Every structure is written in C-alpha cells, then in structure tokens.
Amino acid sequence: MSKPKALIIGAGIAGIAIAIRLAVKGYAVEVFEANNYPGGKLSEFEQEGYRFDAGPSLFTMPQYVDELFKLAGKNPSDYFSYKELDVVCNYFYPDGSRLKAYADVDRFADEVHQKTGESVKAIQQYSRNSSRIYDITNHVFLEQSLHRLQTYLSNRTLQSILRLFQIDALRTMHRANQSFFKDERMVQFFNRYATYNGSNPYQAPATLNVIPHLEQHFGAYFPEGGMYSITGSLVKLAQELGVQFHYQAAVEEIVLEQQKAIGVQVNGKVILGDTIISNMDVWFTYRKLLNRYTKLFPEKILNQERSSSALIFYWGIQKQFPELDLHNIFFSADYEAEFNAIWQQKTIYHDPTVYLNISSKYQADDAPPGCENWFVMINVPANTGQNWEQLIQQARQNIIGKLSAMLGENVELFIINESILDPRSIESRTSSYQGSLYGTSSNNQFAAFLRHANRSAKIKNLYFCGGSVHPGGGIPLALLSAKIVSEWVGKSESR
C-alpha cells in the first residue's frame, strides 16, 4: 500500500516541523518553498565577514525543538545544542539606570530591588501571577486547537474554563502592570512583552502577562551556531526521514475539487496530494492561492488588525562594547507615545525603543576579531503605504543618536557595512502580509479565539500552520501549530 501524501506550502519553521511530524507518522512529504533557502524568517546571511541571523533572535522553550528529534527516535544533541543564558537581557533606561534581567527569578528580584527600589515581594507576586496564567491557558490555548470539539471534552479543559476569570483578560497589560509596580521603569519593563507577539500593551489584554513566565521559568538560550542552526538541524532531520524539499518552487494555486484540496500547482504543473498544509501567511494563502474561490474566504479573519512589523539594521561594527551582551534593550523615554505612533499614527516614533542583538558575544566567529555583528531592531507599523524611504532615513539617524548618547560613543564611526530589512522586504521575502511579524495583533481580549484555525472550515483536507494562525507567532507557538495540525490530520471527527 502506498503512503498517504502530504504537500506543504512553505519551509518556515512550522512547515519544517509539520513535515517531520507527518513523515514520522508514515506520510510521504514534499515541501515547496518560494525562496532558495529554508527557514522563512528564521534564516541567515553574511556580509563582509559578518554573519547575521536575519529574523528571530530569542530562543525559548527548546523542548519543542528537542521533541521533534525524539519523535523520530533521534538524540537531539547529535543534531542541535544550546546554552542556557545566565543574563537574559540588559536594559538601558533614558535616565541612565541599567538593569540586568537574570534568568534566576530570585536573583532578578534582588537586582530590581537594588536598582529601582521595588520590593522583592512585588517581583515574586508578579512571577506567580504569570505562572498561574500559564497553568490555566497552556493546555487549552497553546497546545490544542480551539476549533475541535474534542478539546472541550476533557477534564483539564473544563478545569481551565472554570478558572478563566483568573487570566486577567478584562484589563490591559499596562493597567495590570501598574497594579503590581510603583516604579514606572518596571511597568515599562513588563509592558515590553506585548511586543513578543506584535501587540500594544496599552490595548492588549493582561492575559499576555503569561509571556514573562515562558522566558523566566523555561529559560532563554543561545543555540550553538546561532539561531539558524535550529533551521539547519531540523531540515537535516526531515531529509533523513525522506522529506523532499523543493526550493525556488513557489506554489501558484491550491487545487480544489468540490471544496476539497487535492493538490498544488507549481510552475504550471499540478502535484496531487492527500493532505495540503499551508505554512504561508493565511492572508496570502487565500488571496493568492485560492483567489478563484472568494466565497470560501473567512473575510472577518482576513480583515483583522495586523500585528506590528520591524525595521532592522544589520551593522558590521569595527569595535567591541564590553557593556553589551547577547540581548540588549534601550528604552524610549515615553513608551505610550511610542506605541501611539505605531498603532494610531502608523508611523515611527522619534525616540524608539531599540533592541540590539549581538550573536558574536557567544559565537565569536560571527564577526572578525575585535568586531561585533549588530542586529538593531525597532518596532514599526505594518506597511499600509507609508513613505518608508523617508521613515528609514530618519529612524536610522534617531537610532544612531540614541545609542551613541547611551553608550557614550559615536556609533556611526564604527559601522563599516549595513543591510536593512523593512516591512516591505519582510513581506516580499516571507509572504507576511503588510510585513506583519505575527499575523494578526492581540490587541483584543478575545484575540486567542479570533485567530484562524489550523484547519479550514470550508475546504476539506486543507490545514494551516505558522505564526499567522492559532496559537500565534514566535518560534515556540509556530512549532505548537505544527503539533496541533499533526494531531488533526487524518481525523474525521467533527470540526
């Protein structure tokens, strides 16, 4: 008997993960990728002796990567290794104060007390609150589909539903954080976690205060070889399992027959399959690959507010800065004004919060001797037709001015090469509509229920994974989307 065949659109991290999971289940799997490399946002490039991870730079919850190797009967350490960080991130405030976010909660609480005067008890209470939200939401919202009847037929789900009032969905992150802390620097610190899924802490529900728990309880890590080693190791595993990757093979259409997905069209040729899974942004999946079937579109979902995007400068720096670490944040003096600029005015604030990642701190050969590779990112609005050339030029000046003032050095003197990624190029390279990094935003208390499901409600045999669908964006959630799909594929129970 021949194997059932799965066709996967896109070799992003979720597409690779679902390919592995279905190959383990006995499927013949083919992956079609428009670019000439795998990974989607999780890619890399080199320029003049400097190596850069192009996209995600924070690695948490490595168990979801390890799980893929274990499923295949492999030892994860034979393919992939990582080191836990003692200091997750360095924070620089406009008033000159600095804060080290230690991975150890007690050590972090002591650091906060010493630097801001906030009580150790306040940090511990916040940590317990974040842990409680995780315990309630993890099983229901993250690890299962919200769109399967089976999800709601378990005691664990029922217990979580009975505790939903404890997830703090009725007030904003900012309002909740103000109730925990007196020092505005700590409110700003925890507001920042809204950016982990491209949202606005002044609008997003306080349920998102679960995110610090993922970072502090499970830890943050640096993968040996950089973030791209996640992609490389998983592609190697997939290939060993027989998965076929086709690069520069953009899918032109999902082929339907009586509202059933039966294949894909690539370079004018139809390839048939039993299961079709799109790792492409759900917006483009419908608008480009199913554009002849507009009556089947979930218009309300497709018209939801998009998440924020990013403007990234990749700088080769001809100097080393000992006060910097792998992850560094330089805060804005007026956080609310910054988010208002992004979300209401659809522009870039003149004093943006700057994230600076330097992988050469842990991987010395990512930069020449005595140098550093700077990944410099700010949050920006999704692309709706702004004058990006003007915005980028002004943002570059503002960022250099900010970093120079806070580091006491004229940063521009040390930039010897540069590449830029903006919302337009993010969209063109990764098929992320408007360059949004996480699909739809979470600026709504019902956001978790409003994301697109992992299975089409109207097209049989069509599934979705990746950051634009349930449970959300970022590496851990993208990997979980693949897990949800793998547990659904082949099932005939009620949607």
Image (tube, rainbow, N blue to C red):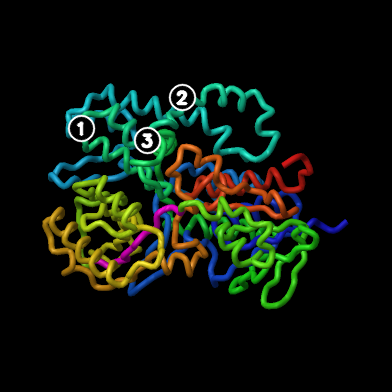
Residue to which mark 3 is pinned: 172
Q: Secondary structure at mark 2?
A: helix
Q: Residue at x 18, y 68 (%)?
A: 412
The part of the image, by quadrant, that contains residue 277 is bottom right
Residue to which mark 1 is pinned: 183
Q: Position of residue 493 (x, y in %)?
A: 77, 40
Above or below: residue 350 compared with residue 200: below
Q: Amino acid at mark 2?
A: Gln
Q: Position of residue 183 (x, y in %)?
A: 20, 32
275 or 298: which is nearer to us? 298
The part of the image, by quadrant, that contains residue 71 is top right
76 or 311: which is nearer to us? 311
Indicate yes or no whether the magenta region holds residue 310.
Answer: yes
Residue to which mark 2 is pinned: 166
- Look at the magenta stretch and give its main secondary structure: strand
Q: Position of residue 44 (x, y in %)?
A: 44, 65
Q: Amino acid at mark 1?
A: Asp
Q: Residue at x 40, y 54 (%)?
A: 308
Q: Secondary structure at mark 1?
A: loop
Q: Secondary structure at mark 3?
A: loop
Q: Tell me whether the residue at label 3 lies in contact with that at label 1, contact meaning CB atoms closer than 8 angstroms.
A: no
Q: Earlier in the sequence, mark 3 or mark 1?
A: 3
Residue 274 is left or right of residue 266, and the answer is right
Pointer 3: residues within 10 angstroms few (<14), some, or many (20+)? many
Looking at the rendering, the stretch of residues picked out in magenta corresponds to 306-317
Q: Which mark is residue 110?
A: none
Q: Residue at x 55, y 36 (%)?
A: 141
Q: Earlier in the sequence, mark 2 or mark 1?
A: 2
Residue 256 is left or right of residue 15, and the answer is right
Q: Residue at x 47, y 59 (%)?
A: 42
Q: Amino acid at mark 3?
A: Thr
Q: From the image, which quarter does the C terminus lie in?
A: top right
